[in-house]
Image: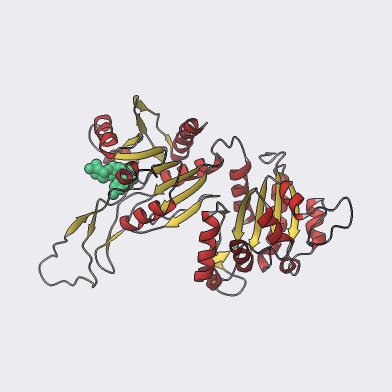
Amino acid sequence: MSARLAGRRVLLVIGGGIAAYKALELIRLIRKEGGAVRAVITAGGEKFVTPLSVQALCEDRVHTDLFSLTGESEMGHIQLSRSADLVVVAPASADLLAKMAAGMADDLATTLLLATDKEVLVAPAMNVRMWTHPATVANLETLLRRGVSVVGPEEGPMACGEFGPGRLAEPAAILEAIVARLDGERILAGRHVVVTSGPTHEPIDPVRYIANRSSGRQGHAIAAALARRGARVTLVSGPVALADPAGVAVVRVETALEMRAAVLAALPADAAVFCAAVADWRVEAQGRKIKKTGAPPALALVENPDILAEVSRLEGRRPRLVVGFAAETGDLVAQATAKRARKGCDWIVANDVGAGTGIMGGAENEVVLITEAGAEPWPRAGKDAVADRLAERISGIFQ
Ligand code: CTP
């Protein structure tokens, strides 16, 4: 049996909502990994699961009341938050997220969330309209900025009969996000890393766009590998068909201009890894669908800003380590070395994306790391393994 959470203590806040029943399965999974769980249930949560069933699974008293310090064995909100390695809120209702964002403290759960100095992971669950409401979106942004990490929600049919994002992440996915925060050597704890991933889509008109073959697999794997080492990761992703990596804050964008804005908004960061295949050009704004009129249309292209070069040259706000990627089809090392100098970044991860390599969009990667010291070829490996190796090298800088 694996015990990836051996000796780790999770303080689980169970909010109100039909998904609260999944918290029971989550407790079981955490314990199976060797972790200890102490639980707090909100008044709303108690409507959906009973303290007795939670207590039976935790083998510990369940905490529900802010003002119930009756005996020696009882714990106050400060003590509760100190006794954990990680605070997990699952399900996190819209109401609970709003209270967290506003810094309210009107019950045990919100008071300990305000009092804690530990990392907080939230697993939101709510009706799709509540999830997409600007108030919830703003509250979540506030929490992400403060370093709270998020897992889910997932998309699918919901208990309320609607369909869309808002469903609590599966307990197994929440477990992985917990493991990502607590397992292994957390060398990057307290560090913020921005990662770009995937392609960009540049609209030609309201129905067509220019894209490229990037799948986002490498960038997403890097984000996950950095999060496993304890970093707070902001992943700015173009359109991809991938699940969000556990414990990573994902900002979704479409165009190069949106990606640039999201990256700049995510700074400051200790490191930035630019893995996205950003379109070099965009089409001059076309408000209306281009019609067939006989002659094919001439698309007027405008150069997009180079996000990597811009961040590499930022004054004052430049991350300590800036890593670029170079997709080449010619003399790999010579071109990537020149690109490193041209862009002003610290490292370039260069790969040959020639037609026969199967790298662009594939599961494997074969890269050469270009640093100040020269070129270092890495053996062909799965994109997860390449990501781990890169995260390890990045960790070395911050040790
Ligand atoms: N990049 C970026 N913004 C752009 C273009 C590229 O941030 N507008 C980043 C990519 O994320 C990657 C690196 O720059 O880390 C190199 O991308 P690549 O497409 O290989 O380089 P280009 O600058 O486009 O150079 P060229 O196409 O001439 O080889």
Residue 11 horizontal/vertical position (percent): 71, 51
Residue 345 horizontal/vertical position (percent): 33, 37
Q: Is residue 129 above or below residue 193?
A: below
Which color scheme did the rendering employ for the protein? secondary structure
Q: Give the quadrant of residue 161.
A: bottom right
Residue at 41% from the left image edge and 53% from the top image edge:
237
Residue closer to the observer: 28 or 166: 166
Q: Residue furthest top?
A: 373
Residue closer to the observer: 264 or 39: 264
Q: Is residue 78 above or below residue 124?
A: above
Q: Residue furthest bottom?
A: 161
Residue 18 horizontal/vertical position (percent): 67, 68
State ligand 1's quadrant: top left
Q: Is residue 339 above or below residue 265?
A: above
Q: Residue furthest left?
A: 295
Q: Tell me, yes or no, if residue 142 can be seen here.
A: yes
Residue closer to the observer: 68 or 300: 68
Residue 144 horizontal/vertical position (percent): 53, 55
Left or right position of 292 against 180: left
Residue at 14% from the left image edge and 65% from the top image edge:
297
Q: Residue furthest front?
A: 316
Q: Is residue 259 above or below residue 350?
A: below
Residue closer to the observer: 195 or 315: 315
Q: Tell me, yes or no, if residue 353 can be seen here.
A: no
